[in-house]
Amino acid sequence: MLKLNNLSKFYRTDEVETVALNAVNIDIEQGEFVAIMGPSGCGKSTLLNVIGMLDQPSEGDYFFMDENVASYGEQKLSQIRKQNIGFIFQNFNLIDELSVAENIELALLYHDISAKERRQRVEHIMDKVGIAHRAKHRPSQLSGGQQQRVAVARAVVGDQSLILADEPTGNLDSVHGQEVMEMLQSLNNEGTTIVMVTHSAAHADYARRTINLFDGYVVTQSMRAAS
Amino acid sequence: MYGNYIKLALRNMAKNRLYAFINVVGLAIGLSVFLFGMVLASYERDHDSMFSQRDRIFTAGAKFSDAAEIGVLETNSIYTAMGPLLQEELGEDSLVARTVTREFLLTVGSSNDSYYHTVTFADPEFSELFDFTYLSGDNSALADPLGLVISESTALKYFGRADVTGETLTLDHEHDLVIKAVIEDIPSDSHFNSNLLTERDARLFAALDTLADIRDFNIDEDWGNLSMGDMTYMLLPEGRTQQWLYDQVNAVYQRHSPEGQIEFIPEVKVRPLTEDNTMIWDAIGIPAITSVQLLGLLVLIIACVNYTNLATAQSLGRAREVGLRKTFGASKGQLLLQFLVESLTTAALSMLLALACLELIVPLFNAWSSKVLTINYLDIFPFLIATTTIVGIAAGAYPAYMITRAAPIDSLHNSMLRGNKGGLFRSFMIGVQFTISVFMLASVMVMYFQNKQVEQSANIFPKDNVIVLERVGVDAIKARHETLRNQLMNLPGVEAMTYLSQVPFNQSNSASGVALEPGDEASEILMNRIRVDEGFLETLNIPLLKGRALTRDIAGDVMEAESEVVNVLLNQTGARSLGFDDPLDAVGQSFFEILGEQSRAEGLTATQFIVVGLLPDQNFLGLHNKIKPTAFMIQPPWLNNAAIRISGDNMVQTITEVERVWDEVIADYPIQQRFLDDVFNEIFIVYETMNRVVAGFALIALSLALIGLFGLAAFMAQRRTREIGIRKVLGARVDQIARLLVWQFSIPVLWSLSVAMPLAYAASGLYLNFFDERITMLPLIISGAALGALVTAWLIVSVHAVRIAMSSPIGALRYE
Ligand SMILES: Nc1ncnc2c1ncn2[C@@H]1O[C@H](COP(=O)(O)OP(=O)(O)O)[C@@H](O)[C@H]1O
Ligand SMILES: [Mg+2]
């Protein structure tokens, strides 16, 4: 599904050059569930942002569905992004001025979808993640686990085939974290590709493959025996 | 404690420099404009303080009814016949003094140097009312019928020195007057030097009795002449009120005014001397001084709103600070005070900056306007303190209230930053600003287009190609009219020439009652008379609709003293007023003068006018006047002006030639010439200045509003970065996000338009009412102004919207 070829990312700030990713080679197949682990500051989020096309690589190639998108401009990336990729963040990133339903609908708003169909799909997905009874609430009125479920719903409501989750359980207690992981797993079982950054070895166990990063390098890639 | 607050305030300003800068500079601009308006208004309303009896001196002026139809509501002049009657009525304790200002040819001493100069003729009591500073002579000078009082600079101009008592000035080559006193120049801020419309050059005073002799009119019996600037001053007796004076004056007027006068002048207005300087604005019905004050206040309001808006927006970012302070025990009152001290500090800094600006503006303005505005800080100190306090509190109250009322837990969680608290208020404030700005902008544009219209309709006369020769009405020159005309017509550059009683744009109405049948008083109408000569139509490019032009070759075309029948030209309105449905039918018909009682008693016969030609309706009086029924006739004694149309080539040479011919033919009088265009501009410049002044205010107001919007948009965009980041990650395009931000600001701007447009429509009426020919596309112009403001607002907000929409979303999402 996507392939990173000697891909590097540098940040230049006031004479200091940070190498966030150093000639990374990663291959991810359709339908995989990949966990990315590593100490803080090793480049996990950067990797996820590059994969999610929120950030452009400094060097190297990035093939997304056999298309080299490394040199694409924001306009084109945005097109690909909104068709294919859903995001889940550690801090949920919901908009407080909007209700739960409206937050989810946001992911459809910029697609060419009629208001009626948008509403149906939002209702369907809210049922699925068990948040329907909170449809009219504001994010600030929900618990963290509920907020993250809204975020998951928002990430998949547009039928995105790839979900990128940056420490989705980082702000949650273990019970709620467990819930979210189970949701991701069931999505993966339905065929959605998932790339997830996590600090928790237990949560990484949900993934079939773990990539360990250290200081911008891919250190190990370990496959878990299919269960 | 307060010192601590001020330190905090300054530190906060240093931290947020852009906002502090916008706030201080914005408020300073608002304050400068407001203070300047106040200083100017109080200057205009506090004239003549150099005269010790100022507060007891009042003036009498005619108030006109609608029936008078002369385009002004009042004048500061009343008939000279009123003077002695008033003195009698008011008694010994009062003083009544009249002045009449006329222009004369002055010959200096025994030289041949002659100049035209206005001389103010005054009753002897005049010297008792106004205590001038005498450099030589004393206030008995005007008691001498041949005496003159001259101002220092006039003496220097004509004699090159100031000690000129005993010197002679000759009026019109025949009347010798002797200088009896020299006075210090009258300061600019005296009504003697007000020159809004009329030049009242009062630096030469003579006895009123002398004028009666020279110009041969019975001043004490005159119920016919009203001329702006010809004053009747009255000293209010001790212990009496203005109302008492008004009652006395009007009792005299009712008792003595000639029959029928009351219809046109229903009452005599009595005003304190201090009002004379500004009464012209009341007269023409445009409250200019009040408008300047109001505009200044509006600009200040816009500046305050800027502060309030930015401070409100910015204070949200300080919620955490406030939360902490509360958690540690600060009371609501203390916090409120802290924020108010902050806004008061800003206001005080702005006030200092504004005063510095005023120190620069006032001298520049004085140099430009030849006014002598001064700022007496001691006098206005309390006012400045009050203004600073009010501005500080008005601007800072809302943000202070809003930030301090929140519960500490909310502040700590920074949930305020997320919510839309104060959003409605901010919208409302933006709306207020734009209402004011659009209102001003629309008014400016209406004035501009109306002025353009006035200018355009003035172009029916070839004003750039017509030279006007003035003061050719004295007998000595009249005798040589024929020669002058023949010689001028021989010049290659001269295309046409005529003598006439008034040139276009001269605001002079000389009307008499006429009717189709002799003695038919029931259908009497007022007909303006303009005296012309051969060549009139050619010179001014006036087309003839029917009939023929007037010529001296036909005896019936020239009106002599004994003429009983005379041929005239008539304009369309004149024909219609006489009762011709089709004005063309008037040609060949007659109408008759309606004689007054006295003339009938003297056995005079009513003149018969035969219409030999019909002219189109053109606004001969120009500018704000109505087109009136007008008859044009050749009547030699009235021909005081000449108009010469010259060709567009070699204008300079032609003018030189004209001057040469004049000097040959009329060596004993200086030529007085100017372009017809200058005659037009003399008054047009007042409208243009008004337009410019309002435009200046509008420009400042709009700039302030836009700066405020810019600051606010920057803040709101920053506040919404995270939301925008989310939207972008979810696939929103740059233009979709930009539109979202722009829309947020469009709502208040849009509703403000719906308030401002009707307001502007109403206010425009105030200006337009002054004119007879008005622009018709008022709604279009006002909508144009509104659209202009809207588009500018959009552009300003778009700058931020596009910038933020283009930026990468990750930063916004990662760092909370
Ligand atoms: N916008 C940026 N500018 C400069 N340096 C950055 C930026 N974003 C990330 N970095 C740096 O790149 C490195 C990797 O960061 P990140 O991918 O966020 O690490 P992780 O998510 O693994 O904690 C860190 O050293 C970080 O400081
Ligand atoms: Mg990270």
Image (cartoon, coloured by chain):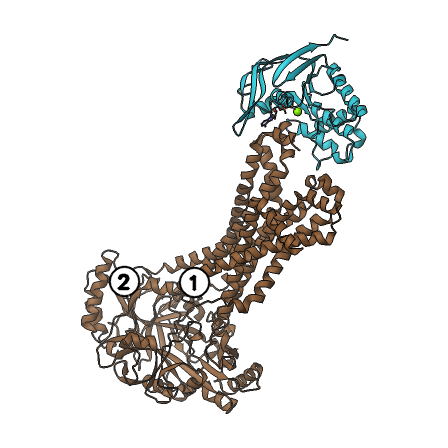
Position of B454 with respect to B566 (left or right) is right
Position of A60 with respect to B612 (left or right) is right
| Numbered label attached to residue B645 | 2
Residue B114 placed where, x, y %? 25, 76
Tell me, yes or no, whether dots 1 and 2 are on the same chain.
yes
- The residue identified by callout 1 is B363
Residue A105 placed where, x, y %? 70, 29
- Residue B84 seen from this side: yes
Figure quarter occupied by ligand 1: top right
Position of B32 with respect to A152 (left or right) is left
Colour-to-chain, cyan: A
- Residue A138 seen from this side: no
Q: Nearer the viewer, mark 1 or mark 2?
A: 1
Residue B15 found in image quarter: top right
Quick one: which residue is furthest to the top in this view? A225
Please state which amino acid type lies under the numbered disc 2.
Answer: Arg
Q: In this rendering, is residue B58 above or below B508? A: below
Q: In this rendering, is residue B208 above or below B692? A: below
Residue at left offset 60%, top offset 43%: B745
- Circle 1 sits in a helix, a strand or a loop, which is it? helix
Residue A86 placed where, x, y %? 67, 23
- The verdict on label 2 being within 8 Å of ligand 1 is no
The N terminus of chain B - image quarter:
bottom right
Distance from Cα at disc 1 to Cα at disc 2: 42 Å
Residue B762 placed where, x, y %? 56, 59
- Pick the residue in front: A221 or B152: A221
Chain under callout 1: B
Residue B570 found in image quarter: bottom left
Q: Residues within 10 Å of mark 1 (few under 14, many from 20)?
A: some
The C terminus of chain B - image quarter:
top right
Comes first in the chain, label 1 or label 2: 1
Colour-to-chain, brown: B
